[in-house]
Image (cartoon, rainbow, N blue to C red):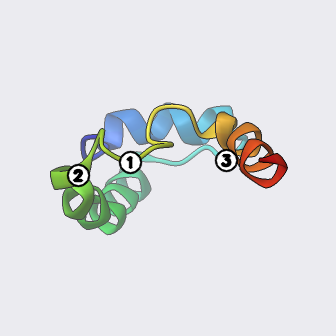
Amino acid sequence: MTRPTPKEIKPIAQVSGIPVDDEIATRISNSIGPAFEGFAAIAGTLPFDLEPASYVVAQVAKVSK
């Protein structure tokens, strides 16, 4: 889990239907960057870090046990 750069944010925003210019992509990167840096120490240790889509499967399995 690394801090996203403006070059990574621009295409993600475009795919989601919200095109942004370079200045806005930089502002987004600067605003969410500290959160990524805060979680860097535990990145890869969280159970749903790599596959959040499996959350529902795990939740249902836990309830049915």
Which residue is located at x 31 percent, y 65 percent? 35
Q: Which of marks 2 and 3 is nearer the N terminus?
A: 3
Is 57 on the left or on the right of 10, as rendered?
right
Question: Residue 27's spot in the image, x, y percent?
Answer: 35, 63
The amino acid at mark 3 is Ile
Other residues around mark 1 within 10 Å, as few (<14) / some (14–19) / many (≥20): few
CA gap between label 1 and label 2 equals 7 Å
Identify the residue position indicated by label 2 in the image.
42
Task: Indicate the quadrant where residue 15 lies.
Answer: top right
Residue 38 relative to residue 54: left or right: left
Disc 3: which residue: 18
Q: Which residue lies furthest to the left in this view?
A: 41
Residue at figure coordinates x 23%, y 52% from the top left: 42
Kindly report which numbered mark, 1 or 3, lies closer to the viewer in this rendering. Answer: 1
Q: Residue at x 40, y 60 (%)?
A: 28
What residue lies at 67% left-to-right and 44% top-to-bottom? Answer: 55
| Amino acid at pointer 2 | Ile
Q: Quadrant of residue 29?
A: bottom left
Which is closer to the viewer, label 2 or label 3? 2
Residue occupied by mark 1: 46
Is residue 17 shown above or below 41? above
Spatial CA distance of label 1 from label 3 is: 29 Å
Q: Earlier in the sequence, mark 1 or mark 3?
A: 3
Tell me the distance, in whole angstroms, between the alpha carbons under discs 2 and 3.
31 Å
| Res 33 quadrant in image | bottom left
- Asked if the residues shown at circle 1 and circle 2 are in contact, with their CB atoms under 8 angstroms apart, the answer is yes
Name the element at disc 2.
helix
Amino acid type at image mark 1: Leu
Task: Residue at the far front: name it.
Answer: 65
Label 1 sits on a secondary structure element that is loop
Q: Relative to 8, is 58 on the left or the right?
A: right
